Amino acid sequence: MLVGKSDHREIPTFFSEKIASPVTVFNSPNFTSFYKQKRPNILLSVATNISRPFIFRKSLQLIRHKIEEYQPDKVINFYEMITGMAYGIYRFDKKMGVEMICVAHQYILLNPNYKTSAEQDMKYYFLRMLSRITSNRAARILALSFRDMAGAPDKRIVTVPPLLRSEVFHSVPSDGDYIHGYMLNAGYYDEIANWHARHPEVPLRFFWDKSDAAEEVQVDDRFTITRLHDEKFLKSMAGSMAYATTAGFESLCEALYYRKPILMIPVHVEQEFNAYDATLSGAGITGKRFELDRLVDFIPYYKPDETFRDWVHQAEERFIQEIC
């Protein structure tokens, strides 16, 4: 298992513990230089990544070495740009017969059956470009989707359900009295704390991946922040009345499965697309700040997608069909 990392994000401990495979880490381009630890600065991110060619060259060489060492039947690429570039340079599919299969939600943008406006085409241009770089030599492109839709065989694109971890299916959702939340960056803390000060009657249970924080921060008896832990996170989501998030794809799918109304505050363009696509499935509302009163007001009007669970339950069969 090869995992790309950045200097600004740590690989969660639960991933390393549960993957049940040796993990080799390499440097990979990523969003950097968060303004007030909230949103990434795109120009600084590009400049930072361009200034590190030697580091990324070592990553390319590592991937080449590992593929030549392991001689895998196939390589599954979860939207890793360095892996896509390595296939473009070293052509493992032609020289070694090792196919690459790409898996990600962003690939739905390459599907001609997914309709976007001219304005959205401009907005998501960078995302489409990155999607092509990562999948240029892919034998198949598995586009994770909130909804079933036709694929595009001529473009090697197959629409597939989201991959949810097995623990999701072991929790029985209930309607609690608190808002469950996740903030990608610690800079959102003041925003959430200020809202809580104005609305102390609404209990908050938030999570973050702040590496130097205590396991649990008890702000007061109705507001806690827990360091990201997979089982605690899912249990809290399942028992909540709603979910506030920076719009990562996996947790949006988990909330849809548990039928929780969502407030989405995307941090970067990938999450902006996640949020946009999720609203098409009726997942919730979007915003630029953690204005949780909007989420509370939305709860009575929320109508869950009744087809989503059946769609998710088809994932294992479909993935076996496409990968094996």
Image (tube, grey):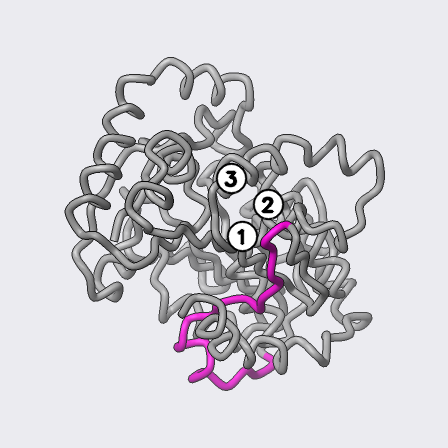
Contact (Cβ within 8 Å) of mark 3 with mark 2: no
Q: CA distance from mark 1 to mark 2?
A: 6 Å
- The circle drawn on residue 271 is 2
- Start and end of the magenta stretch? 155-175
The residue indicated by pointer 1 is 248
Residue 68 x/y as whole percent: 19, 44
Name the amino acid, label 2.
Gln
173 within the magenta span: yes
Residue in view at x 57 percent, y 83 percent: 174
Residue 106 x/y as whole percent: 59, 48
**Figure check: 172 above or below 53:** below
Residue in view at x 63 percent, y 50 percent: 155
Q: Residues within 10 Å of mark 3 (few under 14, many from 20)?
A: some
Q: CA distance from mark 3 to mark 2?
A: 22 Å
Q: Nearer the viewer, residue 7 or 232?
A: 7
**Figure check: 305 above or below 291:** below
Which of the marked residues, 1 or 3, is nearer the chain's N terminus?
A: 3
Residue 122 x/y as whole percent: 75, 30
Q: Residues within 10 Å of mark 1 (few under 14, many from 20)?
A: many
Residue in view at x 63 percent, y 71 percent: 260
243 within the magenta span: no
Residue in view at x 52 percent, y 34 percent: 38
Kind of element beneath mark 2: helix
Quadrant assignment, res 230: bottom left
Q: Nearer the viewer, residue 320 or 275?
A: 320
Name the amino acid, label 3.
Asn
Left or right of 142 on screen, residue 116: right
Q: Nearer the viewer, residue 26 or 240?
A: 26
The residue indicated by pointer 3 is 136
Residue 310 x/y as whole percent: 63, 82
Which of the marked residues, 1 or 2, is nearer the chain's N terminus?
A: 1
